[in-house]
Image: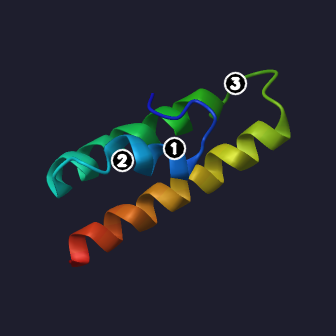
Amino acid sequence: MISPNFNINEFIRQTKNRDKYDIINLAEQEATIAWRKTYRSDGVINDVIKRSVLYQNKLLKLIDKIRSV
């Protein structure tokens, strides 16, 4: 996982020199991993779940933005 802290800025910083298809692929993988880390996980704190969901949404918006260019 590129950003284990669910930080979109860290993800962008780590992927900024890659081509758009690679970024889309990595963002899709990252969103899936973030979802898996919190889905039906006993003991996951609500704040972690909230940050994961926000991160997933930001990644999906990034993917949409890249695809529209």
- CB-based contact (under 8 Å), mark 3 and mark 1: no
* 2 vs 3, front mark: 2
Q: Measuring 67% from the left and 29% from the top, which residue is drawn there?
A: 40
Front one among 55 and 45: 55
Q: Measuring 42% from the left and 39% from the top, which residue is drawn there?
A: 30
Front one among 37 and 55: 55
Location of residue 17 with respect to 2 vertically, above or below = below
Location of residue 41 with respect to 49 vertically, above or below = above
x and y percentages locating residue 32 in the rendered image: 43, 39
Mark closest to the chain's N terminus, 3 or 1: 1
Specify the label residue 27 is tagged with: 2
Describe the element under mark 3 as helix, strand or loop.
Answer: loop
Location of residue 20 with respect to 10 vertically, above or below = below
x and y percentages locating residue 41 in the rendered image: 69, 24
Q: Measuring 45% from the left and 44% from the top, which residue is drawn there?
A: 11
* 3 vs 1, front mark: 1
Describe the element under mark 2 as helix, strand or loop.
Answer: helix
Residue matched to label 3: 41
Q: Residues within 10 Å of mark 2 (few under 14, many from 20)?
A: many
Quarter of the image with the C terminus in it: bottom left
Q: Measuring 53% from the left and 51% from the top, which residue is drawn there?
A: 8
Instruction: Specify the amino acid type for callout 1.
Output: Glu
Give me the C-alpha separation between circle 3 and circle 1: 24 Å
Residue matched to label 1: 10
Q: Is residue 48 left or right of residue 52?
A: right
Is residue 16 visible from the viewing direction of this image? yes
Front one among 40 and 50: 50
Describe the element under mark 1 as helix, strand or loop.
Answer: helix
Mark closest to the chain's N terminus, 2 or 1: 1
Instruction: Specify the amino acid type for callout 2.
Output: Ala
x and y percentages locating residue 65 in the rendered image: 33, 73
